[in-house]
Image: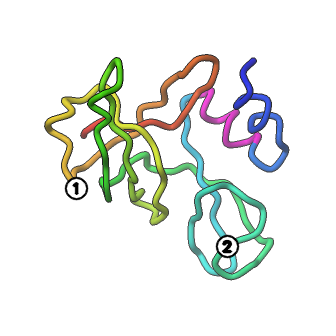
Amino acid sequence: MSILSDALEHHPETQPFWSALGEGRFLLKHCRACGRAHWYPRAICPFCTSADTEWREASGDGTIYSYSIMRKAKEPYAIAYVTLAEGPTMMTNIVDSDLEAIRIGGSVRIAIGKRDEDLLPLFRLA
């Protein structure tokens, strides 16, 4: 098991997220008090500080807010901020896509991927 798995998958506050990801599902925390979704998963809503939060299945759809292509890496790759259809923006990687086709405002779809021992929420161009 890797360091990321140890640090995140076994934390009780985020365990449902990682378990669902392992089943091919993408969950987000939602606040029942203010109705907003938030990322990173946490028990307390960062918008209204309510503890009345729950896990909900997310669409897995998003839009590229910003990105950067690491061209000098051994294998070029793209990192991006993706704004999810549910509202939150998350940092991720764009995978299995033509790097030259990545654009701000471009549509993406969840592509659960594995890095070393870790499952991660990655995205590909839609």
Q: Earlier in the sequence, mark 1 or mark 2?
A: 2
The crowding category of the residue bearing disc 1, from other C-alpha atoms within 10 Å (few below 14, some 14 to 19, many at least 20), is few
Q: Which residues are magenta?
A: 15-23
Name the residue that disc number 2 marks: 46
Left or right: 105 as drawn, with respect to 121 = left
Q: Residue furthest left?
A: 101
Say what secondary structure mark 1 lies in.
loop
Residue 84 screen position, x and y as percent:
42, 56
Q: Amino acid at mark 2?
A: Pro
Residue 119 screen position, x and y as percent:
59, 27
Q: Quadrant of the N terminus?
A: top right
Q: Is residue 28 above or below residue 50?
A: above
What is the total number of numbered labels drawn onto the structure image? 2
User: How many angstroms separate mark 1 from mark 2 (CA)?
Assistant: 26 Å
Q: Residue at x 68, y 36 (%)?
A: 18
Q: What is the number of the mark on residue 104?
A: 1
Q: Quadrant of residue 117?
A: top right
Left or right: 52 as drawn, with respect to 72 = right
Q: Does the segment drawn in magenta span residue 107?
A: no
